[in-house]
Amino acid sequence: MNGLMIALRMTVVTFVLLGLVYPLAITGLAQALFPHRANGSLVRDAGGAVVGSELIGQGFTNPAYFQSRPSAAGAGYDGTASAGSNFGPTSQKLRDRIAADVTRLQGENPEARGPVPDELVTASASGLDPHLGPAAALWQVARVAKARGRSAEEIGALVQARVQPRTLGFLGEPVVNVLLLNLELDRRYGRPAAPGH
């Protein structure tokens, strides 16, 4: 009986320390030191409405916006169903989807130079990557510039200004956050009249 009481006391102490005190302390510390990150890195538009997170990709179909990588998460860009398609290089379904995406992107971007960048036809492992490499964003400049009634040079400079360098100067690759880039377009030039987002 004595051993049972010791085990029960240890269970209660462990529950209180690790199940209540520790999570509350870490949550409080995160809120105090990094409130933006602790609350999901939410992004707001000019009107103050939440339009997404810096950490979760979104699909954009309007020609006046830069498009993200494809997503296999749920029905696409579903933050509650983060996943890849798990199709391998021998998958006919994957090849068919990529071929269809290449054809679509070439049709939507007739003035783009060079082949369709791989990032625009391949999903990330999570299906929620919010970033593109600078080359994939710049490949779309002519379409966005035409839809916005701006010069390709002006839109290209906007992309270049939004390039985030490698973390600590050597980790990863330079990237562009597609949502933040599209919000910058709206901030500078207004929301497009065409349907879609």
Image (cartoon, rainbow, N blue to C red):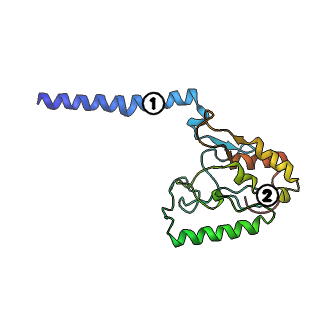
Q: Residue at x 59, y 32 (%)?
A: 35
Specify the quadrant of the image occupied by residue 141.
bottom right
The amino acid on which the numbered mark 1 sits, given as a three-letter code, is Leu
Percent of width and height locating residue 146: 85, 59
Q: Residue at x 56, y 26 (%)?
A: 32
The amino acid on which the numbered mark 2 sits, given as a three-letter code, is Ala
- Report whether residue 46 is seen: no
Could you tell me which secondary element the residue under label 1 belongs to? helix
Q: Which residue is mark 2?
A: 64
Circle 1 crowding by C-alpha within 10 Å: few under 14, some 14–19, many from 20: few
Task: Mark 2 or mark 1: name the one nearer the start of the chain.
Answer: 1
Placement of the N terminus among the 4 image quadrants: top left
Percent of width and height locating residue 87: 49, 64
Q: Which residue is mark 1?
A: 24
Between tags 2 and 1, which lies in front?
2
- In the rendered structure, the answer to whether residue 6 lies left or right of residue 79 reads left
Q: Residue at x 71, y 48 (%)?
A: 134
Q: Is residue 103 above or below residue 43?
A: below
Percent of width and height locating residue 61: 71, 62
